[in-house]
Structure formats: C-alpha cells, structure tokens
Amino acid sequence: ANSYLGSIGTTIFTVMSALAVEHRSINLGQGFPDTEGPRDIVQAAADALMDGRNQYPPMPGLPELRQAVAAANRRFYGLDVDWAREVTVTSGATEAITACLMAVIDPGDEVVLIEPLYDTYVPVVRMLGAIPRIVRLTPPHWDLPRDQLAAAFGPKTKAILFNSPMNPCGKVFTMEELAFIAGLVAQWDSYAICDEVYEHLVFDGARHIPLMTLPGLRERTMRIGSAGKTFSLTGWKVGYVTAGAALTPLVQKAHQNLTFTTAPNLQRAVAAGLSRDDAYFASLATSLQARRDQLAAGLAKVGLSVLPTAGTYFITTDFAPLGFDGDDVVFCRHITEAAGVTAIPVSAFYDEPGAPRHYARFAFCKRPEILEEAIARLKRHF
Ligand code: PMP
Ligand code: GLN
C-alpha cells in the first residue's frame, strides 16, 4: 500500500452515512439536500443527453459553461474574467482543489491551512509531498489568531488553501480578516487556493467576499466554485476554477491528467443554472437561513449550545451542557443508534492531536418536516 494512504481511515462522511442507513437514522451528517435541485436545470441535463451531448467535451470545459462562470464572476463580484484564458471546469470542487495544488506545489513546499478544515485538504497536500502548516481557529466564535497565522507563513510557503464560507463551522471571514490574509500571501510571494463552494449560501445579509477581489491577489488566486452547492445537486460533481491567465494553463495541465473532462450534459445544464436571475440565488440563501434558524432553535431546546453560523449547510453545537459521558465520536454514534439522528464529530475536521472533542456538526439542508422530526427525536432522548 502507499505508505501515506495506508495510514488513513475511511472518510467520516461515508462512515456516518452508512451508520445512519443501518440504524434508519435521520442523516444530518453528510451535507446534501434532501430535495432535488431546480427542475429546469435537471431537465436541461436530460435534454442535453438526448441531444447527443455524450462524447468528450473540450478539456478545459464547454465554452458555454466557462462563459457563464466568467459572467457570474462579473455579476456577483465585479471581477473581470476572460473565459477563454481564466476558467477551467473540473469534476467537482474536490478535483479542483487537487488540480490547483498540483498547479503550484513542489515536494517540500509548505501549505498554510486553517483548522477546522475539510477532510480532503491535508491528505492531498501530503500526497503531493508538501508540508501542511496548520493554524487553528478559536471556538466558540472561530476567531482567527492573526499572530499564529503570520507565524505559519515563511520563505517555504507556496500557498494557503483557504475555505470561506467555512465547513464545518459556518464562519464567513470578514473583510478585515481577508485583508490580513491577503497581506501575508503577497508578502511571502505565495498563492491562494480559495475553496468557495458555499459562496451563495450566506445568511443575515452577510456578503461573501472572494479573496481574489482584494488588492494584489487577482493573479495569485485560484477561486473554486461548485454546482453541487449552488444548485443543490451534490451528486453532479461539476466544479470550476477561476484563476489568472498565467496560472490557468497549470491548473489545466493538472486537470488533463486527473479527469481530463466532466460530463458534457451536466456542464451545459450548469451553464443554464448560472444564468438564472438574482431571485434564484437570493431564495437559495433565504430558504436555507430559515432552516438554519429552525434547527438552531430546536437544538437549543434539546439543551445543546448552538454556535453561530453565517453560511454553509452546517451548524456546530457544543454538547457539553448535556453532560454526556464521551467524546464527539462517541456522541455522534450514540445519537445515531439511540435517538435516530446522525451528526458529524467536529474532531474529524482536525489533523493534529488536541482537537476539541465536544462539538458535533448538524446539516440543516433538509426539509422542515425532517428537521422537526429530528428535533423531536433528540428531545425524546435527552
Ligand atoms: N469543499 C468543501 C468545503 C466542501 O464542503 C465540499 C463538499 N461538499 C467540497 C469542497 C466538495 O465539493 P464537490 O462536491 O463539488 O466536489
Ligand atoms: N461536503 C460534504 C460535507 O461536509 C460531504 C462531501 C463528501 O461526502 N465527501 O458534509
């Protein structure tokens, strides 16, 4: 076995979803909506299949989708993007993350990461022979320790891999924090790989600000989006990278050796989706915000301490007030088996020892009646 992969376990999302199925539990673990994405987008994919869009599309992605990504960059963030030289379509954000790292990383380079972090980041950084330099946010408000972040950057830093809005803790980084990060990226002449899959899932009038829009960052940034989150179609795995004209050919060389292309009918449908009016994007966020509020209020009534969430599909909770005897892994298994509700232990989003062990993450991208039933089950149990 590969000496690194042999040492890591199966992803927590697979483990907890299997456990949820086994116990017929309501799965508020793995983040996926329980309703279909917009009917017209699904229909566009079906139509494209029947139209004979079934052979290899162009390696960098269908022009119509790359044009739609460029137009969305302009419409939402005022970014002026040349679709032909600065956009690449990938098979999900997951491939995009790997392709962007491959574009700039040599073995021995350092990559700055912020913990808690999405569970693919560290394995991919390590598989490329790079060294993760991890900085931990401070709960319960997930504050950024700026001195520690500054100390993580240095002459060996090649990139920061940065996620906002942030899974699992629902943090949306502020302009001041982004400016601080941007300053370090520029100071150390490095790159920013920005995982912005939750860019349209921000609440309470908060605004997502791409790091790419900050002064000096336009040519240093690879900005990643995902149709899975933007159109509630997580199984589609259509992602896109916006990067400067110098970086894009490198991203594409990685992409051509990873997957080469992405299903053409899905690309065409996502292009149609990105052209939807502002009302679609606004209602996506308001609908999720209502369900966030519903689940947060319910979990608080159960007795959990609910941490603030400004974006994403997720609420993190501190279950210490329940007086439960066991860590977060034990807690999440226990509520699956004994209450019929599944959550994800937040320690799964930490690489190094010393992770907090009293937080559980619940997904609220579910129908209101399902959230209500989950809350009722937890109330009966605790
Ligand atoms: N990044 C983050 C932070 C995520 O939460 C996810 C998963 N949902 C992904 C990337 C993967 O996105 P995709 O399904 O498009 O590969
Ligand atoms: N991003 C999803 C989550 O955090 C899971 C994606 C996956 O299963 N790999 O729940």
Image (cartoon, rainbow, N blue to C red):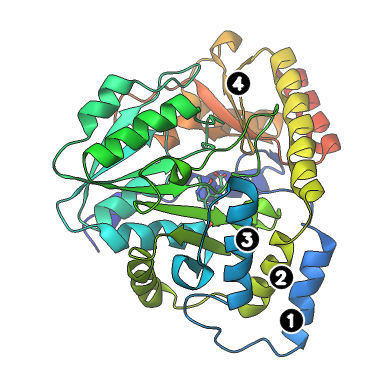
Q: CA distance from mark 2 to mark 4?
A: 34 Å
Quadrant in the rendering for residue 350 = top left
Which numbered mark, 2 or 4, is in the foreground of this view?
2
Residue at 64% x, 51% y: name it.
229
Does the residue at mark 1 contact the one at mark 2 (Cβ under 8 Å)?
A: yes
Q: Quadrant of the C terminus?
A: top right
Does the residue at mark 2 contact the one at mark 3 (Cβ under 8 Å)?
A: no
Please name the residue that numbered disc 4 is placed on: 308
The mark nearer the N terminus, 2 or 3, is 3
Number of numbered discs visible in the structure rendering = 4
Please name the residue that numbered disc 1 is placed on: 48
Q: CA distance from mark 2 to mark 3?
A: 15 Å
Where residue 259 appears, as percent x and y from the top left, is 44, 75
Please name the residue that numbered disc 3 is placed on: 71
Where residue 143 appears, as percent x and y from the top left, is 43, 20
Q: Amino acid at mark 1?
A: Ala
Residue at 55% x, 74% y: name it.
262
Q: CA distance from mark 1 to mark 3?
A: 22 Å
The mark nearer the N terminus, 4 or 3, is 3
Given residues 66 and 288, the one toward you in this image is: 66
Q: Is the shortest distance between ligand 1 and the CB of mark 2 under 8 Å?
A: no
Q: Amino acid at mark 3?
A: Ala
Disc 1, SS: helix
Left or right of 56 on screen, residue 76: right
